[in-house]
Image (cartoon, rainbow, N blue to C red):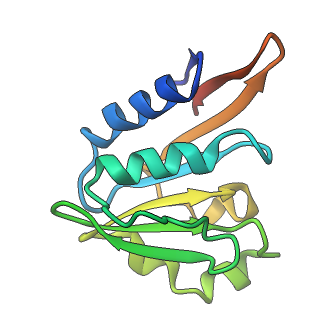
Amino acid sequence: MSHRLRLENEKETCAYAVSLAETLKPGSVIALSGNLGAGKSVFARALMRALGVVDEAMPSPTFALIQTYDGRNCRVAHMDWYRLEDRDEIEMLGIRDYFAPPWISIIEWPERAPELIPDGAIRLRLHGVDDNVNARILESL
């Protein structure tokens, strides 16, 4: 069942990520879509902090493709498929290993290979709104 939620600022976006983190368990996969600048990385960092990741930098995995972290009672894999061209290139990264415990996976740009996203993944889309540059619409798909 899909729903839409308006988040008025970064604080509300981060608060939603914290509430989502409370529902996750090892093996959870979050597929996070949205245009460039939609707030995917902000959301992902807030989610990772809520999962117990203490790494201060938490750089976007745009160039590394996959960044891994130790969380509280889990490991966290943050993936960015933006620069990847096709399913085969993504699959060669061994991504399926990250879809099972002890991992919780956060995937930015899952639309690059939607068929690789496991059933049961939490699919979210963020996008901006015209009347407030800081606000976002979060859709669960």
Instruction: Look at 59% across and 16% down and name the residue there.
Output: 8
**Residue that lies at the very extreme toward the left in this rendered image:** 73
Q: Residue 95's x, y, as percent?
A: 51, 78
- Quarter the C terminus occupies: top right
Q: Residue 57's x, y, as percent?
A: 48, 65
**Residue that lies at the very extreme toward the top in this rendered image:** 131
Q: Decide if residue 120 is on the left or right side of residue 85.
A: left
Q: Quadrant of residue 9?
A: top right
Q: Nearer the viewer, residue 25 or 131?
A: 131
Q: Quadrant of residue 88?
A: bottom right
Give the number of marks.
Answer: 0
Instruction: Look at 69% across and 68% down and name the residue there.
Output: 81
Q: Decide if residue 101 is on the left or right side of residue 123.
A: left
Q: Decide if residue 1 is on the left or right side of residue 9.
A: left
Q: Residue 55's x, y, as percent?
A: 37, 67
Instruction: Look at 42% across and 37% down and name the residue there.
Output: 17
Q: Quadrant of residue 90?
A: bottom right
**Residue that lies at the very extreme toward the bottom in this rendered image:** 92
- Residue 49 vs 81, above or below: the answer is above
Instruction: Look at 72% across and 42% down and name the residue there.
Output: 34
Q: Residue 72's x, y, as percent?
A: 19, 60
Q: Nearer the viewer, residue 93 or 42?
A: 42
